[in-house]
Image (cartoon, rainbow, N blue to C red):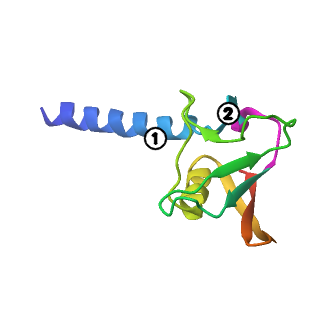
């Protein structure tokens, strides 16, 4: 019985590890940018209109689109982030590293731009 429990535990550990390695995907609209031949992207985070959520837009060099450049789930739902750090942690967990940040102020509106590099 102990051998079966150990075998099942080992199998679950290996399965969860392999799932975390292969599930690294960041979808911008319908494009998995982790599969593109790009090295950098930029997260744009404006001042929140809602104090509990921030809007995150991604520029990876794509052509202009009327659609916002949202981070989405594989089933096409916009990912909601609680803060800029939530977005940075999400990107880090999905194969991207923080490089630098720039704050751009136009009038009373500040936009934070985070340069990210694919690992």
- Image quadrant holding the N terminus, namely top left
Tell me residue 98's x, y (percent).
70, 62
From the viewer's perspective, tell me whether residue 106 is left or right of residue 20: right
Q: CA distance from mark 1 to mark 2?
A: 27 Å
Direction left: furthest residue: 1
Q: Residues within 10 Å of mark 1 (few under 14, many from 20)?
A: few
In the image, 31 versus 50, the foreground residue is 50
Q: Which callout, 1 or 2, points at the residue further toward the start of the chain?
A: 1
Tell me residue 53's x, y (percent).
51, 56
Per the image, the residue denoted by label 1 is 17
Question: What stretch of residues is rendered in magenta?
Answer: 33-40
- Callout 1: helix, strand or loop? helix
At x 37%, y 40%, the residue is: 13
In the image, 109 versus 117, the foreground residue is 109
Per the image, the residue denoted by label 2 is 29
Marker count (numbered): 2
């Amino acid at each position: 019985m102990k051998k079966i429990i150990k075998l099942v535990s080992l199998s679950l550990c290996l399965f969860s590890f392999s799932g975390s390695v292969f599930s690294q995907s960041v979808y911008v609209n319908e494009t998995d940018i982790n599969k593109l031949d790009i090295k950098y992207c930029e997260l744009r985070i404006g001042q929140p209109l809602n104090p509990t959520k921030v809007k995150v837009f991604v520029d990876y060099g794509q052509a202009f689109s009327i659609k916002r450049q949202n981070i989405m789930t594989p089933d096409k739902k916009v990912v909601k982030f609680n803060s800029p750090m939530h977005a940075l942690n999400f990107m880090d967990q999905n194969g991207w590293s923080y490089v630098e940040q720039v704050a751009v102020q136009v009038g009373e509106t500040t936009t934070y731009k985070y340069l990210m590099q694919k690992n």
